[in-house]
Image (spheres, rainbow, N blue to C red):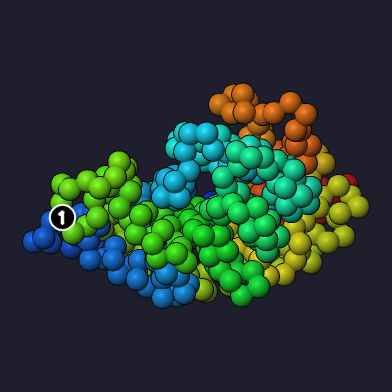
Amino acid sequence: MTLGIEARPLIPFFPPDLFEEDRAVLLRLLRETGTHPAQRFILGERTARLEGELAEQLGAADVIACGSGTSGLTLILAAMGIGPGDEVVVPAFGCAPLASSVLSVGAVPVFADVDPWLMVVDPESMASRITSRTKALMPAHVFSVMADMPAVAALAERHGLRLPEDSAVAQGGVLAGRPAGLWGEAGVYSFVQVKTFGMAGEGGVVVTRDAELGRAVRMLRNHGQDGRERFRHHRIGWNSRFDELQAAFQLHRLPGLPARLARRAEIAAYYGERFAPLAERGVLAPPPGVEGRCYYVYTLLAERRDALRDHLAASGVASHAYYPQALPRQPAFQRYARPGADCPAADLAAARALSIPVYPHLTDTQVERIADAVTEFALN
């Protein structure tokens, strides 16, 4: 390593000053919320406004703010009546809530393999996992790519199955004119800070094109109350309520979301051009374009993933290996891995996927430096 490289400032995988330019607004909102005469800290007027604005932008029948994207998946499954004795087919590669949300309602996750390049669920593998006990298919969008929702939706319709959609990472993604989250009967967006509409805390929303399903989710998020009469519980629910301070902050940041999404797409387009020649050198970039893309993170498939990570670190570029074990390999879910139903593409994704910075705060100079470091590794 040269002294020049050592002296270069680190480009973090995710910036610690993400909300720095909003600091004054956040402090003002904190004071306003804390000193408001109503003393309403959850599920108040600001939460309702955020839900309404998102529903209008998306063309959704309902948007329900909740405690996290993970809890949103659980609420959807419960609202659909999925429970003990039911099976839900999920991708074998992805975040733990794909399986844990199914288990939390008493159902069983059944793992389907993924596309070896896109890393989203393979509809043909999903079809092979359907049995008489299957109640739902739950595809997930991963990294920067939306799942093949037309194929999965057709499969669900053909078999009469429910279709919850794990769109937690995909806010801003659009496929065939339809936003992520509205291809299924209901989807989720996560607002944890690393997501495209991330905030300084935990939270998310359920989005749905089914108003009746939305009403059920709304009731389940607040201990089974319907909002008209407090302490009257119609169903057994959860505490998955949204914070009024965070709702106010998200309302402040919502107008800037399109520009932040556009900057992510611009960075991804540059990466795509730079990395296209590297496929033959063991570094495969995601497909280019904006159709069905969200660019929450930008993820490469590298045959020598750990060596690439080390090279980037030596060059002052932080990276991150998400999901280094496929879900059926995780100790919590191993007993649900069925004999003879291996998921080799999921295992390869777990061994090769490496995400590099793509957040909108990056300067052009930083983006070029990141691309230079990846290219240098592949060509040497």
Q: Residue furthest right?
A: 280
Residue in the picture at 29% in, 45% down: 235
Q: Is residue 233 left or right of residue 71?
A: left
Is residue 368 positioned above or below 345 on the image?
below
- Pick the residue in front: 98 or 336: 336
Q: From the image, which quarter does the N terminus lie in? A: top right
Is residue 57 positioned above or below 250 on the image?
below
Residue in the picture at 56% in, 68% down: 179
Q: Position of residue 191 (x, y in %)?
A: 44, 55
The image quadrant of residue 251 is bottom left
**Is any atom of residue 201 visible in this view?**
no
Q: Pointer 1: what residue? A: 229
The image quadrant of residue 141 is bottom right
Q: Position of residue 43 (x, y in %)?
A: 25, 57
- Pick the residue in front: 182 or 49: 182
Q: Is residue 366 left or right of residue 38?
A: right
Residue in the picture at 24% in, 55% down: 226
Q: Position of residue 75 (x, y in %)?
A: 41, 48
